[in-house]
Amino acid sequence: MQIERGVMDITSLGPGKRFCVWVNGCKRGCPGCISLRLQAEAPQNECDVEEFLRDFPLSRADGATVSGGEPFDQPSELNKLTRLLCERGIDDILVYTGYTLEQLRARGDADTDAALSRIAVLIDGPYVRELDDGTDNLKGSANQRVLFLKQGYEKKYAAYRRSERAMQELTMEQTLLAAGIPPTGFAEKFSDGKKNG
């Protein structure tokens, strides 16, 4: 699987302290995407999912979030990732995708279907900058849906969804990174800030 990074203890992409995985590769090119760098495929980041997970103390994670990039552009690897997360005791798996659930199910692909069977919460649909109203801490624009594919998670996520959007700053390998659903206008402000010094 082409994986940009994995990080423990993320609190800005779902409730609790989560293990988050960002994958490389997305052909959608949504205007205003906060993850432009992850749109390109990165063969140099190809890794074995099982070996990748060995580096993380998953037993302490309250859940896992998979983003990108587009996770469902690597369906067989996403299937393996979700299976291994479940085997390691993580049942609360949240996945972001630019596809709709209907598009994913219409594929008729065994790997896609298997991954969907393990995902607790799916955020589906493309990011649309004009529909970014900032009202939901879990999704970037109003057209996207928060779909509970497993029962019993609505209550766990309810309070988190009502909280304000916040970006979590991380420093990895001397690089400053931000994780989370950006406040409305964040991309433009960030871009302006870089231009202005």
Image (spheres, rainbow, N blue to C red):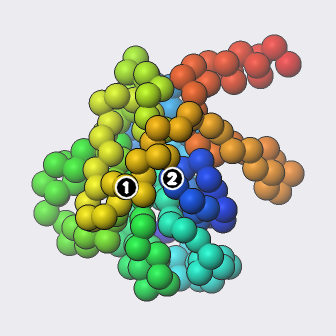
Q: Which residue is denoted by mark 1 in the rendering?
A: 155
Which quadrant of the structure image shows residue 59?
bottom right
Mark 2 Cα shell of 10 Å, populated few (<14), some (14-19), many (≥20)? many
Name the quarter where the C terminus is drawn: top right
Name the secondary structure under disc 2: loop
The answer to whether mark 2 and mark 1 are in CB contact below 8 A is: no
The mark lying in front, picked from 2 and 1, is 1
Looking at the image, which residue is at 67% across and 18% down? 189
Asked if residue 107 lies left or right of residue 28, the reply is left
Q: Quadrant of residue 99?
A: top left
State the residue at coordinates (43%, 22%): 133
Dot 2 or dot 1: first in sequence order is: 2
Please, what secondary structure does the residue beneath circle 1 have?
A: helix
The foreground one among 12 and 68 is 12
Q: Amino acid at mark 2?
A: Gly
Vertically, is 6 above or below 129?
below
**Which residue is under mark 2?**
14
Could you say where residue 21 lies in the image, as x and y percent from the top left?
A: 55, 61
